[in-house]
């Protein structure tokens, strides 16, 4: 795992090395809903290039945050899901999404429904 250093003066720096950047948290946010194939992730992550998605998925897999499952079929079938370490990140992502929703409301920023839909889903299912 090339992005992780042997020591960090601040653990937030380690977190940023593991899940920082424009796409990794958004990828994890999508994977919280279950298993996705590469093309499904590409479709829901509007604006990401194939090269960038491949790179980000590899880094998350190398970090042990997601699982890549390859099926020996033709054409090749590859699926991505959260590993246990990735599942542990979901409460933090929920909190960050709620914080950003509140921030957007305070500053008049137009909001999407991705976070509020997740909160409603959790309250309905009791999760």
Image (tube, rainbow, N blue to C red):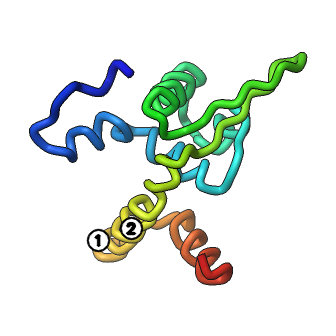
Work out whether 61 lies above or below 31: above
Residue extending furthest toward the left: 9
Q: Which residue is mark 2?
A: 95
Quadrant containing the C terminus in the rendered view = bottom right
Q: Nearer the viewer, mark 1 or mark 2?
A: 2
Circles 1 and 2: CB atoms closer than 8 Å: no
Q: Quadrant of residue 36?
A: top right
Number of residues whose C-alpha sits closer than 10 Å to that of mark 1, classed few (under 14), some (14–19) or many (20 or more)? few
Q: Say left or right for 11 vs 111.
A: left
Number of residues whose C-alpha sits closer than 10 Å to that of mark 2, classed few (under 14), some (14–19) or many (20 or more)? few
Q: For the residue labelled by badge 1, is the local secondary structure a helix, a strand or a loop?
A: loop
Observer-nearest of 62 and 120: 62
Residue extending furthest toward the right: 74
Q: Residue at x 59, y 82 (%)?
A: 123
Q: Residue at x 58, y 41 (%)?
A: 45
Cα distance in 3D space between marks 1 and 2: 18 Å
């Amino acid at each position: 795992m090339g992005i992780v250093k042997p020591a960090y003066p601040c653990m937030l720096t380690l977190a940023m090395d593991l899940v920082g950047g424009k796409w990794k948290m958004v990828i994890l946010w999508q994977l919280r809903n279950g298993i996705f194939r590469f093309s499904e992730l590409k479709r829901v992550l509007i604006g990401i290039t194939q090269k960038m998605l491949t790179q980000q998925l590899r880094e998350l897999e190398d970090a042990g945050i997601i699982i890549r499952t390859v099926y020996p079929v033709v054409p090749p079938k590859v699926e991505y899901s959260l590993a246990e370490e990735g599942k542990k990140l979901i409460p933090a992502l929920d909190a960050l999404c709620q914080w950003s929703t509140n921030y957007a409301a305070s500053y008049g920023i137009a909001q999407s429904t991705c976070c509020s839909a997740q909160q409603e889903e959790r309250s309905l299912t009791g999760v």
